[in-house]
Amino acid sequence: MSASTRIPPIAQPFVSDRAKKTLDLVEEFVEKDCIPADPLFQAQLDAAPSRWQAHPPVIEELKTKARRLGLWNMFLSKSHFSQGAGFTNLEYGLMAEYLGKSSIASEATNNAAPDTGNMEVLAKYGNEAQKGEWLGSLLEGKIRSAFLMTEPEVASSDATNIQLRIRREGNEYVLNGSKWWSSGAGDPRCQVYLVMGKSDPTNQDTYKQQSVVLVRANTPGITVHRMLTVYGYDDAPHGHGHITFENVRVPVSNMVLGEGRGFEIIQGRLGPGRIHHAMRTIGAAEKAIEWLIARINDDRKKTFGQSLSSHGVILEWVAKSRIEIDAARLIVLNAAIKIDQGNAKAALKEIAQAKVLVPQTALTIIDRAVQAYGAAGICQDTPLAYMWALIRTLRIADGPDEVHLQQLGKRENRSRKDAVVSKLNWQRAETDRLLTANGFGKIKSHL
Ligand SMILES: Cc1cc2nc3c(=O)[nH]c(=O)nc-3n(C[C@H](O)[C@H](O)[C@H](O)COP(=O)(O)OP(=O)(O)OC[C@H]3O[C@@H](n4cnc5c(N)ncnc54)[C@H](O)[C@@H]3O)c2cc1C
């Protein structure tokens, strides 16, 4: 059964024939070209003189094949951008699920973060000169980029805390401050940083103090101090940089959208990007189920005379994993449809639901697969340990779960409280009326 025949019935009416054909191509490309090449990518990286200067050749070979198949820039949705492959967010969501099963498939098809979000920013907010300088090369997959918002000295989940100073001097901006978790900054092909800082720190409106400027990665005054590890993994050559800016000068023409528009930009950037992660994570969870099924049917490794699939508790893991993943997929696809029907702002609730639910679900499923493998599950002999580490970060990256839950809870409470209280009061009164009319006493309740 090909991928297009497995599209959930609820999503089928929204998927074009062209997207179905491409979806099947994506599945085949990921399963037959990318997943077998994942270990080759690591081997080529290890064989290079430095993991941070390496660009494994297999990536360029896969890129060439992906382009030939038309699997390129699918993330740029047709309703909001003209530069992409012409699919909707929903259609890309179905494809991204397969990309999430390989650690190199997203880059091989030019759908990898953080470039995706950065290309969206440039396409949506950049002027013609900025697009000419950076967007074309990013769309071609010739260079890479990083988005620098988070800072080591402040709680960055509240972006109003950001401190990096952007001060105007004549025809230049001068940047001073530090950033960390700058994903992608380790790659030697990373040529541009999108840097968020404060251009007007005393503005009465705390959401108008910030701006985003484009900074060439090798500008004097920039120091990349180190790459941060993720549960011990270095994520080379991509990396997560700790970077300082000391009197870094950029022309005023590098300002994106205008001074004080930084918040607007990050809100736009993080919309669809958040569900791209969720979509890929569904694919990672599917991969975990595949590895789980492989282990529990491995007849070489029986416990108490039986394969693991004969133990009821293990089959329950398989069943629960299937239920959870199918439910999570619907949440993601629903968010994608909502974005397609309006925009990311109109789908804030649905995006937040997917952002919170999917990594938690995937982590539970991966953990079951790890458990089924015993000690093998936590070492390098399966992809499960790395997948767990990677997906665990999504509960923090792009805003921690708690921030999204707080916003979701506030919105749900605010929008429903009056209508809910008045409906319940009316129903209680109506029950009393019915009871009295039928010769019974009113309900005794302390409410
Ligand atoms: C793998 C990875 C990649 C990343 N890539 C990038 C990148 O490319 N660019 C970039 O700029 N940043 C990046 N980040 C950083 C990420 O966006 C931040 O870590 C995140 O926004 C949280 O900020 P913080 O680490 O400063 O945590 P803090 O703001 O200090 O928050 C710490 C904890 O406080 C709790 N908390 C916060 N707010 C609330 C609340 N309202 N209610 C209850 N509890 C709360 C949460 O549990 C939270 O985890 C990345 C992070 C990771 C792990």
Image: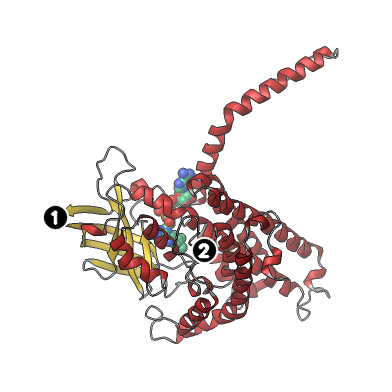
Q: State the quadrant of the N terminus.
A: bottom right
Q: Is mark 2 within 8 Å of ligand 1?
A: no
Residue designated by label 2: 86
Residue designated by label 1: 170
> What's the amino acid at mark 2?
Gly
Residue 185 visible? The answer is no
The residue positioned 48% from the left and 72% from the top of the image is 107
Q: Nearer the viewer, mark 2 or mark 1?
A: 2
Q: In the image, residue 95 lies at what x, y percent?
A: 59, 66
The residue positioned 48% from the left and 52% from the top of the image is 400
The secondary structure type at the circle numbered 1 is loop
Q: State the quadrant of the C terminus.
A: top right
The secondary structure type at the circle numbered 2 is loop
In the image shown, does 3 or 404 lie closer to the viewer?
3
Q: Of the residues under marks 2 and 1, which one precedes in the sequence?
A: 2
Residue 283 visible? The answer is yes
| Quarter location, residue 445 | top right
> What's the amino acid at mark 1?
Gly
Distance from label 2 to label 1 (Cα)? 42 Å
In the figure, is residue 364 to the left or right of 197?
Answer: right
| Total labels drawn | 2
- Ligand 1 location (quadrant): bottom left
Q: How is the image coloured?
A: secondary structure
Q: In the image, residue 410 lies at what x, y percent?
A: 52, 37
| Quarter location, residue 150 | bottom left
Circle 1 crowding by C-alpha within 10 Å: few under 14, some 14–19, many from 20: few
The residue positioned 37% from the left and 80% from the top of the image is 53
Q: In the image, residue 357 lies at what x, y percent?
A: 59, 52
